Amino acid sequence: MRHLTIFILVLSIVSGCAASLRGPEMTDSGVRFTLHAPGATSLSLAGSFNRWSATSDLLGGPDKNGVWSLVKPLPPGRYEYRFIVNNRDWILDPHAPSIDDGLGERNSVIVISP
């Protein structure tokens, strides 16, 4: 049943995504992570860059379009990550590639060039 709940949540997030969202993007201040999740009450970013902490990197939002965002300074490298919706559901970035995590799940991945 839990997998069905997560699937429905992910499906509602992905189907409602704004066309302008394209995954992480570089800014002068760092990498901008965004997720369209208008029904969420909290959203955080966990990944290899913060030792998979569910509380270190909170996204701001939602804006009037239901988009949450965070600009995170990151040095060049390869990082795996997931969004955490409502402190409970770990989901992939629907606008980024994903890879097998070696534990039967997948993680989104970003590579930052020097």
Image (cartoon, grey):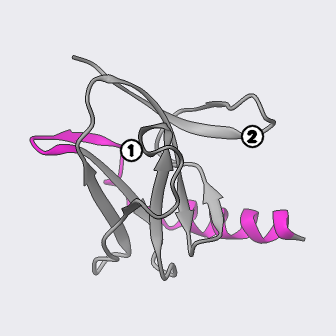
Residue denoted by label 1: 23
Is residue 52 positioned above or below 89 on the image?
above
Magenta stretch: includes residue 15: yes
Say which mark, if any, is on residue 105.
Answer: 2
Magenta stretch: includes residue 7: yes
The answer for how far apart the CA atoms under marks 1 and 2 are is 20 Å
Q: Position of residue 29 (x, y in %)?
A: 13, 45
Q: Residue at horizontal 46%, vertical 64%?
A: 55
Is residue 27 positioned above or below 110 on the image?
below
Give the position of the N terminus as an image quadrant.
Answer: bottom right
Indicate which disc, 1 or 2, sits on the residue closer to the N terminus: 1
* Residue 7 position by quadrant: bottom right
Compared across the picture, whether 77 is left or right of 73 comes to right
Q: Amino acid at mark 1?
A: Gly
Nearest the viewer among 11 and 19 is 11
Compared across the picture, whether 85 is left or right of 29 comes to right
Q: Residue at horizontal 50%, vertical 51%?
A: 46
- The magenta stretch is 2-30
**Element on which disc 2 rests:** loop
Q: Position of residue 107 (x, y in %)?
A: 61, 39
